Amino acid sequence: MTQVDVLLERGHPYSEIANESVIEAVDSLNPYMHARGVAYMVDNCFTGRLGARKWAPPATSCRKPGETVARAA
């Protein structure tokens, strides 16, 4: 979200922001998480830790009562 906020403040259009975010995910984050796992990224990446701390509570609150999260083996 910080990337979005910064680009908006600098006058970039929403289409460019969405495009940059998708490119970042496809080219960098997804291959990295596939190779090392999400836990490794969160444990070893400053940005990953910040994102996990920021988005874990809202994501948890979206679950239905009693619903569990499937975890990869």
Image (tube, rainbow, N blue to C red):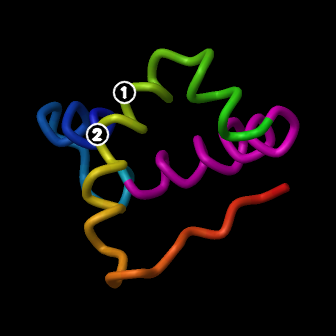
Measured as percent of width and height from the top left, residue 64 is found at: 34, 84
Asked which quadrant contains residue 8, the reply is: top left
Q: Pinpoint residue 43: horizontal percent, then vertical percent.
A: 59, 21
Q: Position of residue 24 (x, y in %)?
A: 58, 41
Graded by Cα atoms within 10 Å as few (under 14), some (14 to 19) or many (20 or more), the crowding at tag 1 reads few
Secondary structure category for the residue under label 1: helix
Chief secondary structure of the magenta span? helix
Residue 23 marker: none
Number of numbered tags placed on the structure image: 2
17 relative to 58, above or below: above
Residue at image point 69% right, 50% down: 26
Q: 37 or 21: nearer the eye?
A: 37
In the image, 41: left or right of 46?
Answer: right
Magenta-drawn segment: 18-36
- Tell me which amino acid carries mark 2: Lys
Quarter residue 62 falls in:
bottom left
Calculate the distance from the C-alpha at mark 1 to the C-alpha at mark 2: 6 Å
Q: Residue at x 33, y 48 (%)?
A: 55
Q: Quadrant of the N terminus?
A: top left
Q: Answer whether labels 1 and 2 touch (C-beta < 8 Å).
A: yes
Query: Would you say 43 lies left or right of 52 here?
Result: right
Q: Which mark is residue 54?
A: 2
Give the amino acid type for the residue marked by disc 1 in the picture.
Leu
Mark 2, other Cα within 10 Å: few <14 / some 14–19 / many ≥20: few
Task: Tell me: 49 left or right of 31.
Answer: left
Give the position of the C terminus as an image quadrant.
Answer: bottom right
Residue at image point 70% right, 61% down: 71
Element at badge 2? helix
Q: Quickly name the residue at label 1.
A: 50
